[in-house]
Image (spheres, coloured by chain):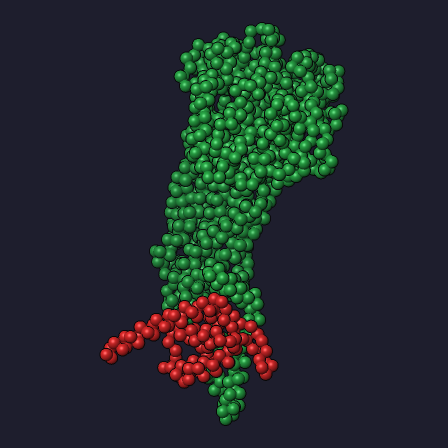
Amino acid sequence: MRMEHWWFTARLRLRSILLARRVERELDEELQFHLEHKIAEGIANGLSPKEARYAAMRAMDGLEQRKEEMRDMRRIHWLTDFFNDARFAVRSLSRTSGLTAFVVITLALGIGMTSATFSMVDALIFRPYPVPHSSDIVTLASTTHDSNLDDFSYREYLDIRGKTKSYDGVIANAGMEAVGFSAEPGATPRVRGGMMVSGNYFRVLGVEPRLGRGFREDEDQVPGRNAVVVLGPDFWKHEFASDPGVLGKTIRLNGTDFTVIGVAPETFPGMLVFGHPDFYMPLAMARVFSTNLQKNFFEDRDDRELIVKARLKPGTTLQQARNELAVLAQNFESEYPKVNRSRGAAVYTQFETRTREDVNWKFGVIFVILALAVLLVACTNVAGLLLSRARARTREIAVRLAIGAGRFRLIRLLLTESLILASLGGLAGIAIGYGVVQWFQSFQNVIFMTDLPFSIPFRMDTRALLASLALSALSALLCGLAPALQSTRVDLVNALKSADVDVPGRKRLWGRNMLVVAQVSTSLMLLTASFLMVRGFQNTLLEGTSFAKDHLLMTLFDPRLVRYNAAQTQQFYKLLAERVRVAPGVQSEALTQNIPLGIDDFEGIAFVPDGLQMPRDRENFNSTMDTVDEGYFETMGIPILRGRSFLASDTADAPRVAVVNEQFAKHYWPGGDAVGKRIRLESRAGTLVEIVGVAQTIKYQGSIEKPMDFVYMPLAQHPVPRMVLMLRSSGDPLQLIQPVKDVVRTLDPNLPMLHTMSYEDYYLNQAVEGPRIAMKLVGTMGVVGLVLAIAGLYGLVAYNVSRRTREIGIRIALGAASSDVLRLVMGKGIVLVGMGTVIGLAMGFALEQLMNSMLFNAGGVDILAYVIVVPSLFLVTMLAAYVPARRASRIAPTQALRYE
Amino acid sequence: MSKPNDLVQGTLDLLLLKILALEPLHGWAISLRLKSISGDVLQVSEGSLYPALHKLEQEGWITAEWKQTENNRRAKFYSLTRLGKKQLESEAANWQRLSSAISRVIQFSEG
């Protein structure tokens, strides 16, 4: 019944809107028809045609009024009114085109910044997984003292899969890693990004392959049996030119032949934020891809490399799933106390997972806060301008009120104006946001200097566009409502009497003063934040980066690509080191599993300091580690502070040794000397390793990381398959490429050299460029905020002066000195700027605390920031007030009194 | 047109729906029909007839269609919709209740 009613009326309204002229014509025709009959009736009754016509018109009780009555019946006048308002607004805005342009640009900057930063936060946190019913997908994580998002081992995954009832499928994947790929068996392998996934991965996620099929369960059951691979959509397009004949083809991954069985659809670029795997392999093929030769992926319960996700059953709550997994984790702990002591488990939603993964999202959130501050300054600016404009229109509004316009109707008219301004600003803002996102995208190749398929995920998509539109509407209301309310609250008699009366009511001035205070305080906060951020970056960037970066060539080897076994691999590295060391131009040589600030994460190590009483609830401690050869510390310029570096005598048969960093030494032996102390690997019963040296703490994973514990193991005692060769040159490091190539050719002509480049270039892009982009962004926001605030303040003071021209003229005529006038005009400005400064300081402190706790972990207050920012802001804003005040003090009384 | 004979508020809707329930008519015919059915007791201002029709149309109770009259003129014919039928029933029932209640009250005071 209601639906039907709605259907009828909606159709009619739509008709009245779209076919307005036709509806109007029909209205005329209908009434005309009636009149003609009435006239004919009158004539038939003996009236003259003229009389009959009058009678007919009289019977209507006013034709035009009736028509209007009928138009109202259509109930669309709110819309036609809106169109009229909009037309009027456009006309009056284009009359003051300069002001309009300023307002639009101001809003565009605010909205553009906000939508660009929103697209960041959206990509980092909110954008749903690209699978059907993505909100049902949860992440299962192992938890420890040190991490609330740890991985599971293969055995643990199988247990979770078999013993939980809350899910429609539990899936697992390893991280995306570099895999040697060749399309033909004979071709030299290239590095591509592959990801191992469980056999049910595509089925549980609900991803239908674009071509072929996904994995079958039985293809992931027997280790090493089914060498099958599913290609990612982009990889298929670029590597195989979207050839459907790729199905059934054999490709070589890390030296093993795999059969292509399917291609993932375009809609599924993968579950990662930044990475888009080129291909997917079953977990059962782990031996081909394993980097850790010490562990058995399929058996060791502490070889934790798997990210486990699951699809919640409909009707099962998150809490039920959490309880179930918590019980399972307790069972693990009691069954396997050795490897699972004080290890829990947690179930996370997508939001919870993303906000635990890394720190990037925190930057996004801080950027959004700053961008919103810019928008707020922009809005107060616009509100101030509209307020001034509305005052100049006092008489027009008074006339409208006097001839009977309702106040609400006038507010609507004025809001329509600000809505149009905000729409224009919003459109321009979207363009700016789009530009900023493009700018981010342009750093794609700079930030990801790698062959792995990473990309910057920030996009101006529908979600970002919707957010921008909502922001525009919100700012229309923010900017427009206060001026609209105020200017329609006029004293009619006074307003009609003069062009511009100002009854200095407290209430009216209060609003405008608040604007100044809000503007000064917000821009102070903005500046402080940008300043702190830039300084925070600089401090943390400089810390712990004293190692060598220049004159270094890096190149990566992975002998698994040519199917070397562990012994062959060891032999290869031994020979490689010996031969390149004497190659022409090489000053020194180093082999390391990972380079500082590289793309790959460092491995973890579990240990127990020998002789230390472990806390009851801990089996061991964890640290990050690297495997290096004896040339590493010298080549990389990392000082050994105490003890010694690795030596050629630290062979596989010699006693096990390790070098730790200063942070590690201070952490476990505060006040004592770590050299000579021993640690046991894994547990109290594990292998003994003696600490022979303490190295300086450097940056390892990222350029803004906090100082972290770190352990180095000698390559001979802790063999790993993939190593980076670092060579120090006397001249251009790229000159060393050819000599190294020659050496490698003598060892194995088929072995590819990967990621061959100057380490300095790599370091600058990887570690410096990213933060520098962030600093630029923050700096820009600070400057934009300041410029807007200055413009706003200048405008407000200048406006005040122009309004009081006559008053000032009288004062001067009566003998006031120009200094008196200056004081009069400036006095108020000083008070307002002062108030704004105090509030802005408080907000700045609050934001600093937030930033410190989120990003830099630097306690305390950065006094320098305030010492620089506060006085400069104060000076600049005072100048903005001084310029118009000075003009006021020079007003010639004769001119001022004639003004008007 | 004199006001005293104007219809009780809301009754015009009922009358129009009732008239259109019999057959589709154009505005002029409706005004003639109104007069002929109710005699001179219920005189409807011709001016208020059209806004009333418009309102009924916007409510979805009646629907309009342009058709040829018997002497070949184009005119807007109104007819009752399904919704209008329901509305007529409920308004008629209302009217019955109201008028019988009022007549009871009047009889009571007389008796």
Please give left or right for residue A17 compared with residue A442 in the image. Answer: left
Give me the chain that's red.
B
Above or below, A652 against B25 in this view is above
Give me the chain that's green.
A
Q: How many marks?
A: 0
Residue A731 rendering spot, x and y as whole percentages: 69, 21
**In front of the other: A643 or A649:** A649
**In front of the other: A380 or A872:** A380
Residue A114 rendering spot, x and y as whole percentages: 52, 44
Above or below, B66 against A588 in this view is below
Residue A324 rendering spot, x and y as whole percentages: 44, 30
Whether residue A157 appears in this view of the structure is yes
Residue drawn at x 67%, y 26% is A227
Residue drawn at x 28%, y 77% is B106
Whether residue A883 appears in this view of the structure is no
Above or below, A855 against A694 in this view is below
Residue drawn at x 52%, y 28% is A161
Residue B10 rendering spot, x and y as whole percentages: 40, 73
**In front of the other: A162 or A829:** A162
Residue drawn at x 53%, y 54% is A423
The quadrant in which the C terminus of chain A is found is bottom left
Above or below, A485 against A752 in this view is below
**Occupied quadrant, residue A626:** top right
**Occupied quadrant, residue A223:** top right
